[in-house]
Image (cartoon, helix red, strand yellow):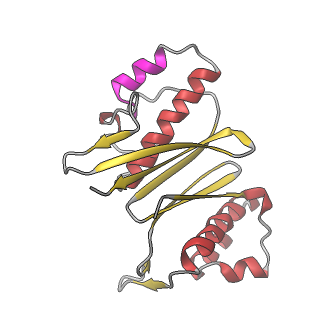
Amino acid sequence: MAVQIYYQLIRDIVIDEQLLSMLQPQRRKQLFSFRLESDQKRCAAAGLLLWKHIYNKHPERFTAAGKPSVANAPFFNLSHSNDFVMLAVSDTPVGCDIEKLHKTVLSHHVFHPNELDALSNLPSGDIQNHEFLRLWTAKEAFLKAIGTGIDAKASSYDFSKSNTISLYDGSFWKLEHHTVCDFPDYLSCVCYKCLQ
């Protein structure tokens, strides 16, 4: 299976009985724990994507500790930013990130020195902001794919010149950047483990 990417526009979400019936019990509980309607819609959008592309094809089970798991399901990862929720599905470990273009603040604890150098050599403004988000979404998608998230080692990975990375364990990872159709102010990235 190739990596599949799905987006859900949050403003299109209507929380009604039909939608609630598609959500997993824990997702419904989580949805009602949010006070803000925007947070409820974001939670519902994530649940809807999961139902459409994972849960309705692979029944949910629970571990002995009560954690939900999905038997024989593909790997998947969620991300959200402002108006969108993103779901990436793959037959290998996968991570994703979506971000809306905005003014950037360089994060020295997250970026590799080569990435910081590349960013500082760009003119400030839209070009630098776009490259910042290209690097940020790559970094976050990769770190989610390997299961760490943003951590102290984030700055040790350099994506300034390549969309692939090999790790010490011999694994090989690929990054793909995408724009969201009809929404050019969003940038997303998916990272997945390549089979050797």
Residue 107 covered by magenta stretch: no
Residue visible at 47% across and 64% down in the picture: 76
Residue visible at 64% across and 32% down in the picture: 102
Q: Position of residue 2 (x, y in %)?
A: 47, 60
Q: Is residue 130 above or below residue 136?
A: above
Instruction: Tell me the quadrant of the picture where the C terminus can be found.
Output: bottom left
Q: Position of residue 37 (x, y in %)?
A: 76, 61
Q: Is residue 138 above or below residue 107?
A: below
Q: Is residue 33 visible?
A: no
Q: Is residue 112 above or below residue 80?
A: above
Q: Position of residue 142 (x, y in %)?
A: 40, 47
Nearest the eye: 108 or 122: 122
* Left or right of 37 on screen, residue 108: left
Residue visible at 29% across and 35% down in the picture: 156
Nearest the eye: 142 or 57: 57
Q: Is residue 137 visible?
A: yes
Q: Main secondary structure of the magenta part?
A: helix
Q: Position of residue 139 (x, y in %)?
A: 43, 41
Nearest the eye: 58 or 26: 58
The magenta segment is 110-120
* Left or right of 186 on screen, residue 76: left
* Left or right of 186 on screen, residue 118: left
